[in-house]
């Protein structure tokens, strides 16, 4: 019997890639929509020299997960566009706070100056950490806001950590688990009594181990070596990030992997010899299922047979995000160049942030902006089913206010992304462990990968797929 993957977003396609490479067995990927890529979507306007991204547009080449993605891109022979650390988009990060655009420090010298919106030099926050003892945390987790406030003070929590969480997962730092983003810092703080102390102790006491986690049998990928040598901060894909899932689908098709679009799974049942996938006009028996679906989409598929598993999956919340892409014909509208800016939730604005796309990549003389709105506060700001005109008008009004751009955009596009980002609320790690323990205890032929479980970034979901496939190979006789 074949293996099946549910979902042809980047994690599902990655699962197909690693299954193919490891097993070379009959394999089908089922995707409910008529396209691959999930939330990665590029809209090309080649005649006018620009493109819109309604999802992510850059990838960081950092660490094991970053190296793994570069290995995948290398195997796909996909052309990329590096952005070095010296690039203005890598150096300049901004906040909109207290009525002004504030440039964040980008060097050690900046720690010793008072820069808006902060009321004292940032080195004072580091001293606060050094003189503050650790507090044992119940259940070994807390919100990332509480952690930052304990260690560095309220200003850092409000104007440093909270807007960063808005940019990463459109979430509220008062709810998001510190283990989501800072697990090693949290654990070292609990063990050694401070973040800086923990970082120093961990550095000096670090045991020599396999730096690539044992996943690169032939050594680090050449692209990763190049990224380290040339000091890439991030990179994009030529002609937009959607070229990555498209290239993956092409590769899989050339290797006899069947990617079935417009094939929504309506039910999933398990037995001792495999599983059955219910499609619109057929029931398909399979040996094993790798689900790359969002947790809230998988939950109803298993509810009839495993209601407890379904309930656990539904305990992972999601948020809605509005993305508004804007094109201006002039290329000198921005007073400050950089990657973009974030808006701290304490400012009580519907805007989460604005990305300056045309500062990251050449857009043929156009200024291209992407406005992100809503997230954890979507209902508060927009209510039920807001019109595209309302969302466009709100985005445009705030761009005019924040960036002082007087003219209207020549062209714009509004995307309403429903339940697009999972929220790693306090206790998320244990929640995921409980879900996977249930699957193991009941010996279900099911593996879970994707943003709901192992990280929301592109690197995270690709590595999540790889690790689940590798665990499958150890547990299953193929």
Image (cartoon, grey):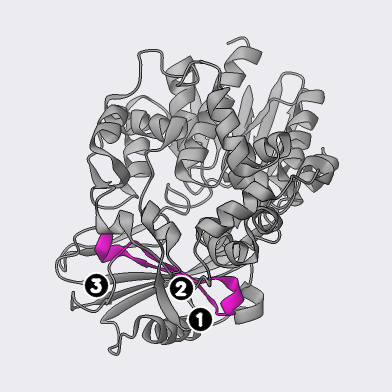
Quarter of the picture holding the C terminus: top right
Residue span colored magenta: 338-360
* Residue at (73% x, 32% y) in the render: 436
In this rendering, would 241 be left or right of 86? Answer: right
Q: Residue 415: say if magenta.
A: no
User: Up-down: is 133 above or below 420?
Assistant: above
Q: Position of residue 214 (x, y in %)?
A: 48, 16
The Cα–Cα distance between marks 1 and 2, rounded to whole angstroms, is 8 Å
Res 453 seen here? no
For the N terminus, the quadrant is: top right
Q: Closest to the observer: 431 or 285?
A: 431
Q: Is residue 456 above or below residue 348?
A: above
Q: Position of residue 103 (x, y in %)?
A: 38, 68
Q: Quadrant of residue 451?
A: top right
Pointer 2: residues within 10 angstroms few (<14), some, or many (20+)?
some
Q: Is residue 38 left or right of residue 358?
A: right
Q: Are marks 3 and 2 in contact (CB under 8 Å)?
A: no
Judge by depth and name the residue closer to the eye, 183 or 409: 183
Q: Is residue 51 above or below residue 351?
A: above
Mark 3 and mark 1 residues within 8 Å of each other at the beta carbon: no
Q: Which mark is residue 367?
A: 3
At 18% across and 62% down in the image, what residue appears?
46
Is the C-beta separation of discs 1 and 2 under 8 Å? yes
Return the mark for residue 116: 2
């Amino acid at each position: 019997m074949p293996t099946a993957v549910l979902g042809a977003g980047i994690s599902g396609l990655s699962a197909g890639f690693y299954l193919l490479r490891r097993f070379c067995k009959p394999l089908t990927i089922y995707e409910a929509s008529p396209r691959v890529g999930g939330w990665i979507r590029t809209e090309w306007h080649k005649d006018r020299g620009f493109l819109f991204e309604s999802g992510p547009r850059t990838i960081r080449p950092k660490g094991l997960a970053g190296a793994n993605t570069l290995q995948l891109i290398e195997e796909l022979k996909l052309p990329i566009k590096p952005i070095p650390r010296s690039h203005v988009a890598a150096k300049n990060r901004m906040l909109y706070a207290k009525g002004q655009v504030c440039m964040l420090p980008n060097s050690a010298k900046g720690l010793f100056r008072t820069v808006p919106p902060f009321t004292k030099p940032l080195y004072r926050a580091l001293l606060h950490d050094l003189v503050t003892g650790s507090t044992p945390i119940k259940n070994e987790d807390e919100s990332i806001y509480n952690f930052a406030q304990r260690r560095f003070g309220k200003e850092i929590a409000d104007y440093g950590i909270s807007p960063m969480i808005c940019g990463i997962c459109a979430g509220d730092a008062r709810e998001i688990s510190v283990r989501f983003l800072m697990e090693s810092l949290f654990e070292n703080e609990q063990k050694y009594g401070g973040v800086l102390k923990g970082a120093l102790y961990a550095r000096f006491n670090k045991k020599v181990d396999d730096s690539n986690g044992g996943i690169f049998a032939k050594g680090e990928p050449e692209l990763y070596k190049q990224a380290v040598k040339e000091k890439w901060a991030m990179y994009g894909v030529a002609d937009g990030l959607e070229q990555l899932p498209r290239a993956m689908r092409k590769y899989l098709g050339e290797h006899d992997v069947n990617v079935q679009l417009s094939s929504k799974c309506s039910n999933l049942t398990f037995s001792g010899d495999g599983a059955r996938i219910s499609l619109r006009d057929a029931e398909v028996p399979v040996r094993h299922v790798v689900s790359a679906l969002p947790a809230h989409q998988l939950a109803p598929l298993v509810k009839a047979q495993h209601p407890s598993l379904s309930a656990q999956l539904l305990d992972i919340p999601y948020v809605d995000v509005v993305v508004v892409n804007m094109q201006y014909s002039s290329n000198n509208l921005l007073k400050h160049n950089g990657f973009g800016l974030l808006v701290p939730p304490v400012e009580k604005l519907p805007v989460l942030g604005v990305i300056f796309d045309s500062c990251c990549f050449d857009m043929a003389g156009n200024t291209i902006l992407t406005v992100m709105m809503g997230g954890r506060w979507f209902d508060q700001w927009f209510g039920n089913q807001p019109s595209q005109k309302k969302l466009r008008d709100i985005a445009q009004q705030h761009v005019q206010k924040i960036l002082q751009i007087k003219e209207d955009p020549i062209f714009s596009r509004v995307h309403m992304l429903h339940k697009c980002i999972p929220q790693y609320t306090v206790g998320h790690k244990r929640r995921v462990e409980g879900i996977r323990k249930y699957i193991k205890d009941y010996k279900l032929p099911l593996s879970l990968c994707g943003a709901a479980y192992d990280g929301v970034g592109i690197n995270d979901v690709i590595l999540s797929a790889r690790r689940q496939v590798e665990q499958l190979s150890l547990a299953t006789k193929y």
